[in-house]
Amino acid sequence: MLWEIVKVLEERRSKLDTEIAELQKVLDTLPNGHLEEKVVKGKKYYYLRYWENGRLRSKYLGKDVTEIKEKFKIATETKIKLNRLIEERNRIVRILDKISKILVENDQLNT
């Protein structure tokens, strides 16, 4: 019975590893940083602000940023999902470690 639980947990951990790697690849294709809007003389200008080599950089994006806003929305949703999967994976790893320690202790007591 215990081995069945361990097997299920290990399969889930493996599946989570795959999903995490896929989400990381998706995040690598999306913009990193945040969108900043500046108003100069009544006109709106949009910049992508991000960190590079320890310095805050700005990149002018233009006046129409509907496409980049959608990408930021996708990036935010992906980061949230990624964090949930990482938390779940970490819980499974802790459970498997505890089971392993218990089994080792039982083996030592039986010998």
Image (cartoon, helix red, strand yellow):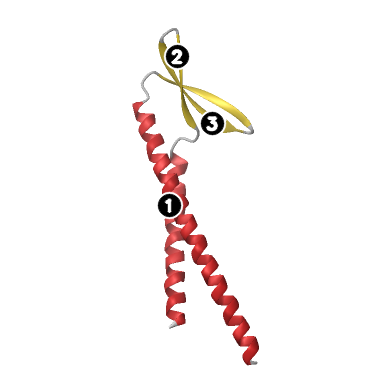
Vertical placement of residue 91 versus 102, above or below: above
Tag 1 residue: 22
Q: Which mark is residue 89?
A: none
Quadrant of the rendering where the N terminus is positioned? bottom left
Q: Nearer the viewer, mark 1 or mark 2?
A: 2
Image coordinates for residue 33, horizontal then vertical, percent: 50, 33
SS label for mark 1 = helix
Q: CA distance from mark 2 to mark 3?
A: 19 Å
Quadrant of the rendering where the C terminus is positioned? bottom right
Q: Nearer the viewer, mark 1 or mark 3?
A: 3
- The residue under the point 42% across, 40% down is 75
CB atoms of marks 1 and 3 within 8 Å: no
Q: CA distance from mark 1 to mark 2?
A: 38 Å
Image coordinates for residue 7, horizontal then vertical, percent: 44, 75
Tag 2 residue: 39
Give the mark, 1 or 2, whose residue is nearer the N terminus: 1
CB atoms of marks 2 and 3 within 8 Å: no
Give the mark, 2 or 3, whose residue is nearer the N terminus: 2
Q: Which mark is residue 50?
A: 3
Give the mark, 1 or 3, whose residue is nearer the N terminus: 1
Is disc 3 surrounded by few (<14), some (14 to 19) or many (20+) residues within 10 Å? some
Image coordinates for residue 13, horizontal then vertical, percent: 46, 65
Is disc 2 surrounded by few (<14), some (14 to 19) or many (20+) residues within 10 Å? few
Image coordinates for residue 2, horizontal then vertical, percent: 46, 81
- The residue under the point 47% across, 75% down is 6
- The residue under the point 53% across, 66% down is 93
